[in-house]
Image: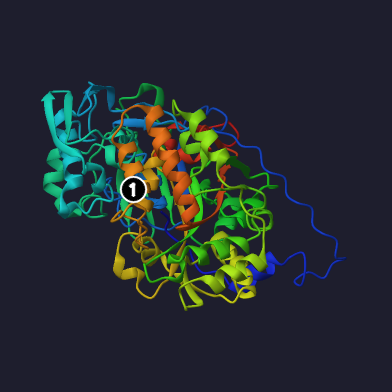
Amino acid sequence: MKAPRTTVRVAGALCFLLAATACTSGSGDAPTAPRAPKLTTTTPKAGGSVDQVDWNLPMGEPTTLDPAKVGDYSPSTVEANLCDPLLRLNADYSVAPGLATSWKQKDPTTLVLGLRHGVHFWNGHTMTAKDVVASLKRQGERATQSVNASLLANVKSIEATGGHQVTVTFKAPDELFLKALVNGFGAVSEAAYLDKAKASYGTAKGGLMCTGPFKLTRWKPGDSITAERNPDYWDTALKPKVKSLTFRFITDPSTLTSALLSGQIDGSYEISTSTAKAVATSDTGTVYYGPSAQTNFLTATSPTSPLADARIVKALSLVLDRDALIKNVYNGAAQKLKTFIPPLVWQNSPASAAYDKAYDALPAVPAPDVDRAKKLVTQADTARRTITVAVAAGDQQSLQTLTFLQAGAKKIGLKITIRQLQPTQMSGLFYDPSLRKGLDATMVLGYVEIPDPLSYAVQMMTPGSLFNWAEYDNKQVTALMRKAQGTLDPAETASLFTRAQARYVKDYPVLPIASPYERLFVNKRLSGLPASFAYLHMPWAAHLGGTGKGSS
């Protein structure tokens, strides 16, 4: 999920959306539709070393860098370069060996991980199976408050069965566990350091002890986070070319635009559409668009929300002109979605053809139909016609999307009230129910971390799951997804999941809107880093280096 940015004015957003009509004073000619950008997975290969890079986190300062707790853009962007996971996500969303060089499913309930030899933590201590066991087990402990705790639900035991071997025994087969090792869930920290730091682990005070290409050297709250390259990094192919990497927290899009144009900031993922347009024609650097696993959708925050009634969700879908939205809000840099899971997630699955076929068979994204939407609102059980929606303050695209939706809702007798939340509130509401009080819905810029669509769907569509705030409960969907998670055959998993997907899509538990492409800006003196959304769980800065054009 995402952390928000600083406030922008709703009036300005509305003017932007109505640029072709009332807010313009030109000849009245319809504006030319923006072209869909060319997508690239990586930027050109880097050359020489660079002394210093200043990188921005447009979603704000992380609240933690503890791998067990990173579940948002800013912390993951930093942590991915500090703490190596057992498996590594590639830029194309495929999976490769990380700290684990082998994995063998001895039987349906026994997984054996072979660990890499010769890996050292930043303090020089050798990584062993003991560290892996401690890192995984603590995610199931209540005191850790891990965002990944549910991934241990089917685990019976995690044991070191050799100096560099870990055996995981399951109560029931679980096809998601292994794939989840690509993110913070699979990141390895030193056991002794964890024991000493306890609750302060991952904070500015407690620090980290990992094996990644960069090591945390300074965290100055409210100002910056600094990481220095690890000269003893185990992956010789990814020896960092950048000596020092400083993360800044510029959340205002205009300020960030100026900093990128002046060279004060060398680059940023997740730049806004307005920033991308402003810097696209400069000679300071390059804007890259990449494949994305991001998903923009509207979801109810409680079972009493008007959006808990599928007819209200469907009615809102019918007043949302997605073509106009993608053109005006995303400047063409997004794709419509039939559901809330983007196709990139399954593209490297052995069963990708089955997922593609099932997605193609889903109902088409509806064209606007106000009359039909009005009838659905009339038929709805809820008497409430006002919907209070949370959005990240400063998230221009989500705010503009809500403004777009707000205008359509008014035509069918619904009132959308927009409540902008500041960074800690917006990020926290995904995990703290108390922060959802007084809200009916939230505009989500979520993302699928694991290269398996089931991983996100179970969090949204099963009773008691992390993000099923409306308490959606379709027993057929639940049974199919549980069975899908319990089979280790990719074809069977795909068959079961897509049957569940076909069912919950009809139920309209959430309103899918679009999947924005990844937007990256990098200074002309730098190159080499991934341009796809996979950066969030890759050691992306280890790919970064100079181009020879002003690099140091």
| Apparent side of residue 389 relative to residue 228 in the rendered image (left or right) | right
Please determine whether, in this image, residue 196 is positioned above or below residue 125: below
Q: What residue do we see at 79% from left, 53% from top?
A: 32
| Image x and y of residue 324, in percent | 69, 57
Please determine whether, in this image, residue 81 is positioned above or below residue 395: above
Tell which of 56 and 142 is nearer to you.
142
Q: Which residue is mark 1?
A: 478
The amino acid on which the numbered mark 1 sits, given as a three-letter code, is Thr
| Image x and y of residue 479, in percent | 32, 44
| Apparent side of residue 167 relative to residue 343 in the rendered image (left or right) | left
Q: Element at badge 1?
A: helix
Report the number of numbered marks.
Answer: 1
Tell which of 190 and 142 is nearer to you.
142
Tell which of 395 and 223 is nearer to you.
395
Q: Residue furthest right?
A: 27
> Which picture quadrant has residue 31?
bottom right
Tell which of 74 and 406 is nearer to you.
406
Please determine whether, in this image, residue 293 is positioned above or below residue 376: above
Crowd tier of the residue under label 1, counting other residues whose Cα lies within 10 Å: few below 14, some 14–19, many 20 or above: some
Q: What residue do we see at 16% from left, 27% from top?
A: 167
Taking the image as drawn, is residue 239 in sight? no
Pick the quarter of the image with the N terminus. Answer: bottom left
